[in-house]
Image: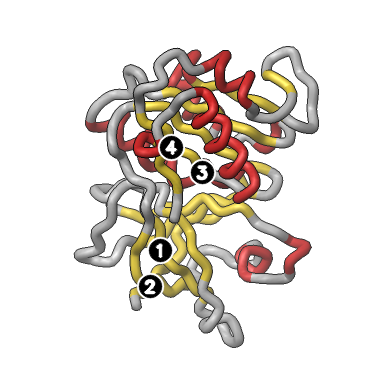
Amino acid sequence: MNTLEIKTIEKITPDVLQIRTNKPEGLEFKPGQATELFIKKENWEEQGRPFTFTSLPDDSDLEFVIKTYTSHDGVTDKLLDLKVGDELLQNEIFGNIYFRGEGTFIAGGAGLTPLIAILRDRQRNGGNETNKLIFANKTSKDIILKDELREMLSDRFINILSDEKTEEFAYGHIDESFLKQHIINLNQKFYVCGPDPMIESVVSDLKALGVESGNIIMEG
């Protein structure tokens, strides 16, 4: 197990932390993959949780973008108490979401995190000429890394909000009709990540539109 020292920690939305740490020598992963992290403090070292690397494999530091849940009194709530110099423990690497070809990325809330790394990697190493991101959140304040994603994807960054009506973004949920409106090519890869009910619904809608199961990539 590796020890990671926190270099920076800050809130980037009301309930999302961005944490940067040192990167252990020899650590390898694919953009989109995750690891198990533990807080190196008494009573917390046995409570591991999965978090995605949002940094890229060739970055000099590690970065994690983590949604916190203060109502749970758990690991993510405890992360809010951490400061520069505190340590995390990092375990094995895993994850089924990694780049398989250009396509449409569909995320709900913190489900964006595996997709951030993939899109950053494509931007750095291959371009994002055709990649599109459809991103569902409750309000505009919840949109993680909005400016960076807009810069990367321009008008291929599509947002929809369930709890706030604005002139800037669509209102509602990602459903079959919304997908039909924003998907022209059904013969591409679809990367889906978010809460389980959302994944189930989106996958069902994609299949109803005619997308083949083999083109749908999700965790698990």
Q: Amino acid at mark 1?
A: Thr
Q: Amino acid at mark 2?
A: Asn
Give SS at disc 1: strand
| Mark count | 4
Seen at 43% across and 28% down, the residue is 211
Seen at 70% across and 45% down, the residue is 14
- Label 1 to label 4: alpha-carbon separation: 19 Å
> Which quadrant of the structure image shows residue 24?
bottom left
**Quick check: marks 2 and 1 in contact, CB under 8 Å?**
yes
Seen at 65% across and 67% down, the residue is 81
User: Earlier along the polypeptide chain: callout 3 or callout 1?
Assistant: 1
User: Could you tell whether 100 is left or right of 48 in the image?
Assistant: left
- Foreground residue among 80 and 135: 135
- How many other residues sit within 10 Å of disc 2, few (<14), some (14-19) or many (≥20)? some
Residue 191's mark?
Answer: 4
Q: Amino acid at mark 3?
A: Cys
- How many other residues sit within 10 Å of disc 3, few (<14), some (14-19) or many (≥20)? many
> Percent x, y for residue 114?
44, 46
The residue singled out by tag 3 in the image is 193
- Label 3 to label 4: alpha-carbon separation: 7 Å
The residue singled out by tag 1 in the image is 35
